Image: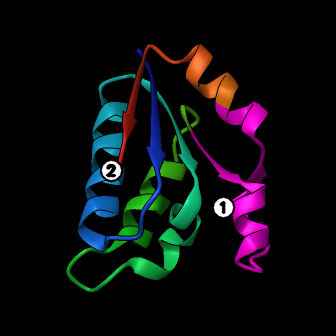
Amino acid sequence: MKLGIIISQTNSETVWNAFRLANFSIKQGDEVKIFLVGEGVEYEKSGTEKFDIKEQAAEFLKSENAGILACGTCLKLRNQEATSVCPMSSMKDLYELIKESDKILTF
């Protein structure tokens, strides 16, 4: 299955659970892409000791069946630079993710 996950918030427990689901899905043999939009582009800052988002994201990115995209406009609005774990993308990329995915989840 091709799973698309859209993260639009920074609540640490919610984002942590989104990445946990993504990692579980990868282990089931699925292809998973995460698109960060709005506050979601700040996901790296929202982790806590209890909800280690960076650890979950690092595990996710180890797979060749995983990918993260981030809204370029949302990054620019926050004066954030694109990084390897938060690469700049566009609405066209989000559209393609939705079009190609079998299922879409939003967090």
Quadrant housing residue 99: top right
Q: Determine the secondary structure under disc 2.
A: helix
Label total for image: 2
Q: Which mark is residue 86?
A: 1
Q: Which residue shows up at 36% across the image and 52% down it? A: 19
Judge from the rendering whether residue 47 lies leftward or rightward of residue 32; answer left or right: left
Judge from the rendering whether residue 27 lies leftward or rightward of residue 7; answer left or right: left
Q: Determine the secondary structure under disc 1.
A: loop
Kind of residue at badge 2: Ala
Q: Give the vertical position of 68 relative to 74 (above or below).
A: above
Kind of residue at badge 1: Cys
Quadrant housing residue 85: bottom right
Assess disc 2: are there few (<14), some (14-19) or many (≥20) residues with their C-alpha within 10 Å of its C-alpha: many
Q: Give the vertical position of 61 relative to 42 (above or below).
A: above
Instruction: State which region is magenta.
Output: 67-94
Q: Position of residue 96 (x, y in %)?
A: 69, 23
Looking at the rendering, in which quadrant would you find the N terminus?
Answer: top left
Question: Which callout, 1 or 2, points at the residue further toward the start of the chain?
Answer: 2
Q: Which residue is mark 2?
A: 18
Quadrant housing residue 87: bottom right
Q: Which residue shows up at 51% across the image and 74% down it? A: 44
Q: Which residue shows up at 44% across the image and 71% down it? A: 54
Q: Position of residue 33 (x, y in %)?
A: 54, 36
Q: Give the vertical position of 69 relative to 16 (above or below).
A: above
Seen from the viewer's position, the closer of residues 53 and 107 is: 107
- Residue 90 within the magenta-colored segment of the rendering: yes
- Residue 98 within the magenta-colored segment of the rendering: no
The span from disc 1 to disc 2 (Cα, nearest Å) is 15 Å
Seen from the viewer's position, the closer of residues 59 and 52 is: 52
Seen from the viewer's position, the closer of residues 77 and 15 is: 77
